[in-house]
Image (cartoon, grey):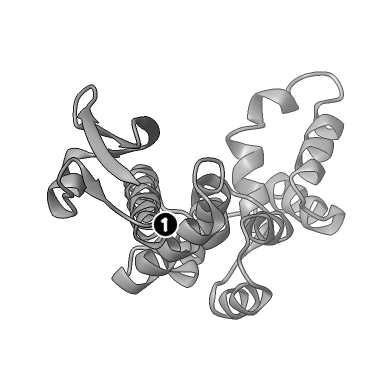
Amino acid sequence: MIITHTKGRGKKIHLHLDGEYQITTDIDFWAEHFIKDGTDIDEDEWQNLVEKINVKKAVNKCYDLLSRRDHSIKELRTKLLRTVDENSAEIAINRMIEYGYLDDEKFAKVLIKHLRDDKKMSSSFIKKEMYARGISSDIINELFEEEEIDNTSSVCELILTKYARKLTQEGGKDKVFAALMRKGFSYSDIKEAFYLIENEEYQQ
C-alpha cells in the first residue's frame, strides 16, 4: 500500500492509501510520525499508525473536556465514546489518570462541597447525583463519613432565601414543603426547619 498525504484546512493532514482518503490527523502528529510520500507500507504498519492517530485524538479530546470542567471517569468515558473508539478512549483515560488530571475521589469531594454548600441539596440528592456520575459506592460512603451534611440547616437557608417570597403566597407553606421534598429532603427535616424558623431558633 502506497501512503501519501495532503494538507487540509488549518493544521489538518489527510492521509491516503493508494490514492484513496483514509484518515485525518494534524501537522504536529505528522511531524513526529512523518512517512515520505510514496512509501510502501504493510497492513500492520498502517494499523499501528491509525491506532496512534486515534489515541492522540482521544487524548486531545480529554484535554479539551477537562479544561472546561472536572469530570468523573464515567462522564469522560461517555463523552469520548461519542467520537472515538473504545480502545483509544481507555488508553486516553488511563493517561489522564496517570498524569493526575482524572481522579474520582478528588472530583467527588469537590462535587459534594458544591452541592452541599452552593446548591443546598439534601444528602439523598447528593448521593443520587454522585451515583449518576459513576462515583463508586466505596468513595461515596467514605466521603459521607468524613463530610458533615446538615439537612435541616440547608432547608432553613432555602426557606429563608430561595422560597421566602413563595411563603407569602396563598398556600405558600405547602408549596414550599412540596418543593423541598422534590429536592430529596425528608418530611422530618423540613418540619424541623419550619419549627426552628417560626420559633426564631435558627441561627445562620
Label 1 amino acid?
Glu
The residue at the far top in this view is 170
Q: Is residue 178 above or below residue 92?
A: above
Image quadrant of residue 44? bottom left
Residue 171: x and y, percent?
87, 24
107 sits to left or right of 136: left
Q: Name the residue rendered at 41%, 53% in the picture.
A: 70
Kindly identify which residue carries mark 1: 43
Residue 112 visible to the viewer? no
72 sits to left or right of 166: left
User: In front: 74, or 46?
Assistant: 46
Crowding at dot 1, Cα within 10 Å, few <14 / some 14-19 / many 20+, comes out as: few
Image quadrant of residue 59? bottom left
Q: Name the residue rendered at 80%, 26% in the picture.
A: 172
Residue 182: x and y, percent?
80, 42
Residue 65 visible to the viewer? yes
Q: Is disc 1 placed on a helix, strand or loop?
A: helix
User: In front: 39, or 92?
Assistant: 39
Residue 118: x and y, percent?
49, 47
